[in-house]
Amino acid sequence: MTTSNSRPTLSHVGLGVLLAGQLLPQIDFSIVNVALDAIAHSLHASATELELMVAVYGVAFAVCLAMGGRLGDNYGRLRVFKIGVLLFGVASLLCGIASSMWFLLVARGLQGAAAALLVPQILATIHVSLTGHEHSRAIGFYGAIGGLAFIIGQVLGGFLVSADIAGMGWRSVFLVNLPVCAAILACAGRWIPETRRERAVSIDRPGTLLLTIIIACVLLPLSMGPSLHWSWPTVVPLFVAIPMVVLLWKTELRQELRGAFPLLPPTLMRLPSVRFGLLIAFLFFSSWSGFMFVVALTLQAGAGLSPLNSGNAFVAMGVAYFAGSLLSARSVLRFGRSQVLILGCAIQMSGLLALVVTLDRVWPHPGILNLVPATVIIGFGQAFIVGSFFRIGLSDVPADQAGAGSAMLSTVQQASFGLGSALLGVVFAQTLRHYGQYLDAALAGLAAEFCLMSVLLVSAIAYHNRHHRPAAVQAGAGLN
């Protein structure tokens, strides 16, 4: 069995298999958005149950990510990756045959837990198996696939629900995962090298329990609060989360002082690059998920576009994102990580302003073509931000902590995806309730996102001024 320290080589085919595995769980975040109405009619689901179906996947995903990284470090990242893919396929099948809403909720929870097993192994395997330009190139692809998945989910979900293949309707958005899972399992053992820590470490049970409580206390209330009118059961857990965070930090510090291996190592949190990477994750991915939620709802409920046409409105954005991701590695080599992040923020924010102007001019009849210029700019800028996020966050993480480091970044990333739709959704809903106009609600949501991105831009400039290194040094270190 190959250890992390022997630097096994990951082939191009192996990288492709890993990225196919990454595509699965990311798509399932957004693919259900366009199927919610069909699920509600088929299973007689309430609005709260639909929101819970979306939330339970994100909560299970975020809660189990850090544990998934630790299991891969201990027992072999390829082995845990394959187990995760297998469980994801089983859970997708259960979702596809669900006969009741509660059955679907349980299956979605299992699907989220399976996703948390496979996702940390992807970035960790890339981190320990590749160096220099190949590492930078792989990170670029990783960022490209991660962003494209969110958009592909919208487009593919709209197509599958509208096509109603073999009369499966909404069930096809889950069953489409089965052949992909089978293909990944058939190729993984042959093309992906096995890596793990040289010495296995014990599981941090207290840290895992506290992390579970914190994420559940934040994501579930924020997901269900608007539909429950922010009654006390949705508010109290948010206050409970604050002392739980303090307790988690103290618990992890005690674990580290005893020579144990905490789930969220304080040694990693002391690295400026990791802390800034977590800040990027919170600000950007919450903005991104909120953007997708607000724009999709505006186009469907406000402008009357069908699920298929609403999904197609993001195609140009996806193409621009993919192109930008392929350029990000070369841009980082030339300009440096933090400079590319600053550039990405500036481009993306320019696209947001262009979208505001476009919606104001073409409303109430926005079409796919007149949205293209603004969404292309947004997608291109987002690609630079995502690529910089992973490069900055992992730049100083030791190889034997690759699983823990990637899991920390992914945990905050996935939690922020769930947080963003709730935060911008509240702004959208409150504006709509006050003014009664979808255009006003959409512009308010986009303005809230612009504020979050402004904070990120200022933070990126400050980080660059404190930790600037010449691009040539970064390239020579092989961390781009």
Image: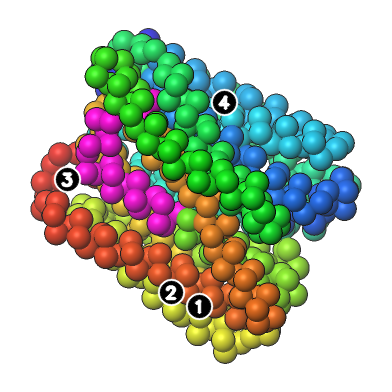
Sequence-wise first label, 3 or 1: 1
Say which residue label 1 marks: 355
**Against 374, is 56 above or below?**
above
Q: Estimate how packed mark 2 is, as few (under 14), some (14 to 19) or many (20 or more) residues with alpha carbons within 10 Å.
A: many
Disc 2 secondary structure class: helix
Task: Tell whether label 1 touches label 3 (CB within 8 Å).
Answer: no
Which label sits in the foreground, 3 or 4? Answer: 4
Q: What amino acid is at disc 3?
A: Ala
Sequence-wise first label, 4 or 2: 4
Q: What amino acid is at disc 1?
A: Leu
Say which residue label 4 marks: 84
Real-space Cα distance between discs 4 and 2?
A: 37 Å
Say which residue label 2 marks: 351
Which label sits in the foreground, 2 or 3? Answer: 2
Real-space Cα distance between discs 4 and 1?
A: 39 Å
Q: Which mark is residue 475?
A: 3
Q: Residue at point 87% right, 45% down? A: 43
Left or right: residue 156 versus residue 169 is left
